[in-house]
Image (cartoon, helix red, strand yellow):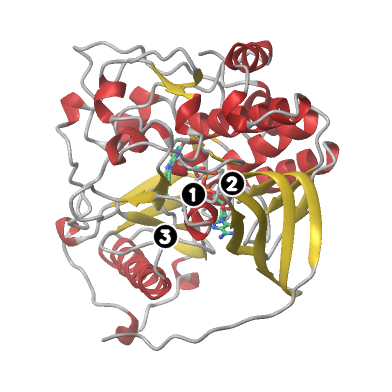
């Protein structure tokens, strides 16, 4: 049925002005903002949640996957600052690619093989606040980008819905790090979503946290109306138990079949996630007698994949399987193709596990350049890549690299009073490598 539409017009204040506006404050956004601010630019970062970090904080996803060295100046600083708190596991190199190396499909073994670095995300929230403040970045929380005003391919302002109501932000360059390509989409540039043939996205996962207790009497019984009880482990939705500091675990529960870009569907994903969380919790407490005290659930469900922008180049899964190099490389990925089937809540992969490992590959600057736009870049899990290429390149390490590259590129363009398309790529690469980023 045709939906009723209304026209709406209003004068709103252009309250914020910056050289560079970073939209979305996950690790990609923070990295973009720091890289640009360190180069003397006035930067604002606009974030819909109450803190920076995205999946790494609000989503409760507390492990850096892939290679954690050589990711560049911003990522190195994040690690250093977490180390100051003693809030990150020790460095372990990501395994070198070899065609004979088979990834394990058992979580514990996979974890051992690929050596992710667990961190304490509660400290990371403060680390990100402090980094933004140290570099003079204006952070704006509880504020969502909802539209954009564009003339001849140039974004003039983005429209924001925040605690003060509707306001606008003006900048010379906008970097979309929303993970959902929200800003690019609202600006009317081309985006893509999910699988090519039906747009179905990879599953989401909800993170919840438990504490181990010794006194069973402290455990709370989950009333019947909240949970369809599960008696056999094989009937549980896919769930993974992660380390989370002393006497505590994080539990990740797979939630499939929802669309992160649709308000109704995303609401259902959150509610379904919390229902499944109770099922999993109930099973472990009641059937396996685990003394798990329910501590808390993440304020947002973890979204692996939303919209991705269509850039000047779309990185493909064949590129990454071939370990392709590009003359305009700005980041390097090493992580395996991590694509859970979107069609079931069990641990099923889209691709055979033995085909998932990839050699080191490069990401070209063109993947950050939003097609047809004059002053927009995209970084993090919404840069221009196909679904399976992104399932590798979306990890925190590589997201930080693409974010950092976007921030440096934006600063270079403004320094030369030039355009994003004319950025001197040699200089961009030199800047990245000067900060110990490996390409
Ligand atoms: C369940 C799960 C487990 C994962 N496990 C790992 C792992 O173990 N290790 C690893 O390295 N990676 C992991 N990943 C991948 C990694 O979390 C992401 O790909 C990474 O978060 C990408 O960073 P980002 O900054 O691009 O996006 P995000 O972290 O999603 O950040 C986007 C930010 O933009 C904000 N935002 C969105 N829309 C708007 C808007 N319209 N206006 C303003 N702000 C907006 C969001 O609130 C968020 O803060 C996992 C992902 C998920 C979902």
Q: Which residue is mark 3?
A: 291
Q: Secondary structure at mark 3?
A: loop
Mark 2 Cα-neighbour bin, 10 Å: few <14, some 14–19, many ≥20? many
Give how far across and how far down residue 77 sits, in percent: 70, 27
- Residue at 53% from the left image edge and 43% from the top image edge: 373
**25 lies above or below 393:** below
Q: Nearer the viewer, mark 3 or mark 1?
A: 1
> Which of the two marks, 2 or 1, is nearer to us in this view?
1
Residue 85 shown left or right of residue 281 in the figure: right
In the displayed structure, does residue 196 sit left or right of residue 68? left
Q: Is residue 113 left or right of residue 217?
A: left
Q: Earlier in the sequence, mark 3 or mark 1?
A: 1
Quadrant of the rendering where the N terminus is positioned: bottom left
Give the image location of residue 294, x and y in percent: 48, 65
Placement of 282 over or under 35, stated as above or below? below
When the figure is inspected, residue 425 is found, relative to residue 134, above or below; the finding is above
* Percent coordinates x, y for residue 395 in the rendering: 45, 35
Towards the viewer: 407 or 173: 173
Give the residue displayed 31% in from the left and 87% down from the top: 225
**In the image, which disc is placed on residue 179?**
1
Is ligand 1 closer than 8 angstroms to the Cβ of mark 1?
Answer: yes
**Marks 2 and 1 in Cβ contact (< 8 Å):** yes
Between the residue at mark 3 and the residue at mark 2, the CA separation in whole angstroms equals: 34 Å
> What residue is pinned by disc 2?
26
Q: Is mark 2 within 8 Å of ligand 1?
A: yes
For the residue labelled by badge 2, is the local secondary structure a helix, a strand or a loop?
A: loop
On the image, which quarter does residue 169 sit in?
bottom right
Q: Nearer the viewer, mark 3 or mark 2?
A: 2
Mark closer to the chain start, 2 or 1: 2
Residue occupying the point 71% across, 60% down: 141
Residue 426 position within the rendered picture, expressed as x and y whole percent measured from the top left: 60, 11
């Amino acid at each position: 049925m045709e939906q009723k539409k209304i026209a709406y017009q209003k004068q709103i204040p252009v309250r914020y002005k910056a050289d560079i506006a970073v939209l979305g404050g996950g690790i990609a956004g923070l990295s973009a903002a720091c890289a640009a601010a360190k180069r003397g630019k006035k930067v604002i970062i606009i974030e819909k949640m109450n803190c920076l970090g995205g999946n790494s904080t609000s989503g409760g996803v507390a492990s850096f996957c892939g290679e954690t060295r050589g990711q560049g100046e911003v990522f190195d600083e994040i690690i250093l600052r977490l180390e100051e708190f003693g809030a990150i596991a020790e460095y372990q190199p990501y395994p070198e690619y070899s065609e004979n190396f088979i990834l394990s499909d058992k979580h514990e073994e996979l974890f051992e093989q690929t050596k992710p670095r667990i961190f304490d995300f509660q400290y990371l929230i403060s680390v990100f606040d402090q980094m933004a403040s140290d570099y003079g970045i204006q952070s704006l929380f509880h504020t969502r980008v909802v539209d954009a005003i564009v003339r001849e391919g140039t974004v003039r302002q983005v429209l924001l819905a925040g605690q003060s109501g509707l306001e606008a932000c003006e900048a010379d360059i906008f970097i979309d790090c929303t993970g959902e390509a929200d800003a690019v989409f609202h600006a009317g540039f081309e985006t893509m979503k999910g699988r090519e043939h039906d747009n179905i996205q990879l599953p989401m996962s909800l993170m919840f946290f438990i504490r181990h207790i010794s006194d069973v009497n402290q455990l709370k019984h989950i009333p019947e109306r909240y949970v369809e009880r599960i008696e056999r482990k094989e009937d549980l939705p896919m769930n993974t138990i992660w380390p989370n500091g002393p006497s505590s675990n994080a539990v990740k529960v797979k939630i499939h079949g929802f669309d992160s870009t649709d308000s109704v569907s995303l609401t259902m994903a959150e509610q379904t996630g919390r229902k499944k969380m109770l099922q999993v919790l109930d099973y472990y407490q009641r059937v396996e007698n685990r003394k798990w005290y329910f501590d808390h659930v993440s304020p947002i469900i973890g979204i692996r994949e939303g919209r991705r922008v269509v850039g000047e180049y779309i990185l493909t899964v064949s590129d990454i399987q071939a370990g392709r190099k590009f003359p305009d490389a700005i980041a390097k990925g090493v992580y395996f193709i991590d694509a859970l089937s979107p069609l079931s809540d069990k641990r099923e992969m889209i691709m055979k596990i033995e085909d998932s490992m990839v050699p080191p590959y490069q990401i070209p600057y063109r993947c950050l350049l939003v097609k047809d736009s004059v002053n927009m870049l995209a970084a993090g899990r919404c840069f221009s890549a196909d679904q399976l290429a992104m399932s590798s390149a979306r990890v925190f390490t590589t997201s930080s690299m693409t974010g950092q590259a976007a921030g440096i590129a934006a600063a270079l363009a403004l320094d030369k009073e030039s355009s994003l398309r004319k950025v001197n790529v040699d200089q961009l690469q030199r800047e990245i490598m000067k900060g110990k980023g490996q390409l």
